Amino acid sequence: MRDWLHNLPIAWMTLAAFAATYLLTAVIFAVVNLLARGERARVFKSISPGMLPPLGILFGLFVAFTASEVWSDIDRANAAVNREAGALGAIEILATGFPGEPEAHMRNLISRYIQEAATEE
């Protein structure tokens, strides 16, 4: 369910984080203003400034956990790319053991795979 946020580009992810924080802050502000009528207005107005540090902490935690998830996804993607590149290098080294037509065919297949991976993936 939360994968849609992690799959967004960084600019849209930032916009979504700020929008969610703004919306949450607006809802809290509206609820406080609705409840602050009559005698309770003085009490609610004294609590309102105290709400800013917890909201800031929640926003910071949200951004930190989201960034942590993105960084771990990037690390896993880099590891997968390195494994694939290493495997292709090993296949190319192995292909030199079959001189002539099989080596040329194997190098052609490797080149075609790399081209397809670069354009489609």
Image (tube, rainbow, N blue to C red):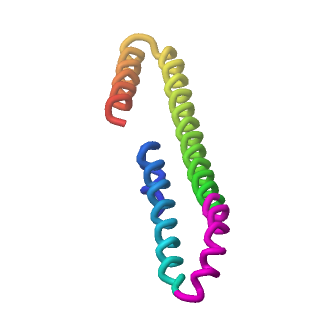
* Residue at 41 percent of width and 47 percent of height: 12
Count of marks placed on residues: 0
Does residue 41 appear to the left or right of 117 in the view shown? right
Residue 88: percent from left, percent from top: 49, 26
Question: Which residue range is magenta in the image?
Answer: 38-56
Spot the residue most to the top: 100
Q: Is residue 103 left or right of residue 65?
A: left
Please state, as top left, top right, bottom left or bottom right, where the N terminus lies in the image.
bottom left
- The quadrant holding residue 119 is top left
The vertical placement of 95 against 60, above or below, is above
User: Residue drawn at (42%, 56%), measured in percent from left and top?
Assistant: 4
Whole-percent x, y for residue 10 in the image:
46, 43
Question: Magenta stretch: dominant SS?
Answer: helix
Query: Where, by quadrant of the figure, is residue 23 drawn?
Result: bottom left
* The one of 110 and 36 positioned closer to us in this rendering: 36
The residue drawn where x is 52% and y is 33% is 81
